[in-house]
Amino acid sequence: MTLQTPRVTTSASAFDTDELVLNMGPQHPSTHGVLRVVLRLDGERVVHADCVIGYIHRGVEKLCENRDWTQIILLTDRMDYVAAASSNLGYCEAVEKLMQVEVPRRARYIRTILAELQRIASHCLWLGTHAMDVGAMTVLLYAFRERELLLDLFEEYCGARLTYNAMRVGGLPLDIPSGWDKKVLAFCDLMEPKLDEYEQLLTNNRIWLQRTRNIGVISGEEATAIGLCGPPLRGSGVSRDLRKDEPNAAYEEFDFDIPLGTKGDIYDRYLIRMEEFKQSIRIIRQAVTGLPEGPVMGKVPRLIKPPAGETYHAIESPKGEIGYFLVSDGKSTNPYRFRVRPPSFCNLQALSRLVKGHLVADVVALIGTIDIVLGEVDR
Amino acid sequence: MTDEKKPVDNNQKPSSADSSVEPSAQTKTVASATAAPKVKPKPRPKKAPPEPPKGPPDQAPPDDVEVPLYVKALQDGLPNAVDQVSYWVGDWTVIVSADRLLEVGRFLRDNPATAFDYCSDVTATDWPPRAKRFDMIYCLYSVSLRQRIRVKVRVGEGEAVSSVTEIWPAANWLEREVYDQFGVNIIDHPDLRRILMPDDWQGHPQRKDYPLEGPGEYLMENPQDWLRLRNLPDEAEIE
């Protein structure tokens, strides 16, 4: 037996701790899909986080460049699959802008209703999963109960519950079924007390406050520079909502407020989304009661072939700014270039900045607060 | 050329068959009957694929549209930086050269008349026949003034274009995606790795000459080299 001499260590390094590399995901329930985060930890504090994405990259942009302008609507469903109507809306409006097509007022109203119902559905899913990540199981069950009613409404409108394919270039394929508007109003009446129910569970909950306050604080300037969009950007107090700034569909005809945060932490983003629920209900009520008569499809040629040119059109999806950059060569029936600016992708970029210095458990909460859908991040 | 040649080949075939086989009346009629429809589809009305466009139209602004202040401010503030101004369906685009991109970017962000502090999107388009085949496109937005502009830079294959991450940190992942999907040579980027495709992927999928159908069996046979094999001309003909 040989005697090993003990390693001589200097006093400084004796108390030094090694950094631990922790691999979180891609198979992890709180990463909302297949997101992998490589965390470098000092004790339980995060020193550095590196997101690895692309696990469900399907080449949507390349596919779209080889499809008809109409066939693409179906593919946009598959990007942000919990807010398919918003993706449809952004794409259809971008093509309409490129073709300079007028959309009938009734179609724009119904589009607004669909987009706002979609916002509520998407926020329900966000609220449920985000609260569950932090440890509140009940909220998930409550939120999914109301989301189910929304999916029923969508099913009655277009027959699908998740990937709606609900819009066309120039308008809508279908008018609303008879009695649907009454059901939407009934849903609005039902949803409002439910929101109070959610808030009772969370807003003043001590555990929720401790897990969300002062976590992931980001200033307005930094959030703008880093490219955050949607509720995370507004949570930092930056007034930017494309529904107000660059009104699309019929948003300019309705009254609604843009909630803004002050601090820019998880709690502010939570409050903003809770307020957005109420504002969405407000918009839907106005749109349904003021729904004009008329056709739902504008005058669009059967073969869609926009003139040569390019455009960028962005709308406010539940996640943030979803933008479409389209290039038409004017000759073929498919776009020469199809590009999506995915809000989840741009928001996820900020994760490594947000988690710095926080605990591992907060990483889970921060993934929840930026509300990503990996189908859109990876495309 | 090829269309003219092929009918000649076709005519030869029945004649060679005639010489080898004993000429009987029956076979001859059969041969001519089979030859006749063979000749027919030869001048195929095969529609030639439309020629790939040579480049973006980049329409000049019409006279009745007023040039917005932010474009004027850029033209006055940095004379000769803007090569071309283009306008289409309400969107303004300025085309600048690659070596002045950072200068233009800083001006657009810091000048109070422009104040483009938000980088919405960075993307690229590929126009293969053009010498400078890539267009780098920066979609900018001003949160305070609520206006948009697109900055376009033309780059050739392998030519360097500076990263704009120091001006807009938001461009980090977006530029990584452009590098991944197009293979544009972006320099001074803090972390230039592939982002959507695996690290060892060959080729850049968004290029126009990249096949749509993916590696398939080529990847099994030769994982190191499938893209080159796929593009070999004789391989394509065997298929």
Image (cartoon, coloured by chain):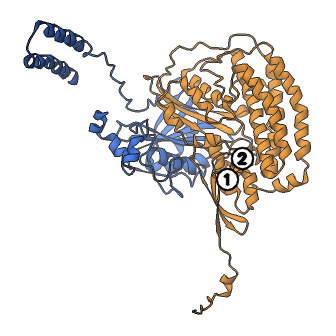
Chain colours: A orange, B blue
Q: Is residue B100 visible?
A: yes
- Figure quadrant of the N terminus of chain A: bottom right
The residue sitting at 62% across, 31% down in the picture is: A77
The residue sitting at 21% across, 24% down in the picture is: B2
The residue sitting at 59% across, 20% down in the picture is: A169
Asked if the residues shown at circle 2 and circle 1 are in contact, with their CB atoms under 8 angstroms apart, the answer is yes
Residue occupied by mark 1: A351
A8 lies above or below B232: below
B36 lies above or below A19: above
List x then y, in percent, for residue A292: 76, 13
What label sits on residue A370 in the rendered view? Answer: 2
Using the rendered view, name the quadrant where residue B14 is placed. Answer: top left
Give the CA distance from mark 2 to mark 1: 8 Å
Q: Is residue B112 visible?
A: no
Q: Say whether disc 2 or disc 1 marks the residue closer to the N-terminus.
A: 1
**Along the viewing direction, whichever of B191 and A134 lies nearer the viewer:** A134
Q: Secondary structure at mark 2?
A: helix
What label sits on residue A144 in the rendered view? Answer: none
Q: Secondary structure at mark 1?
A: helix
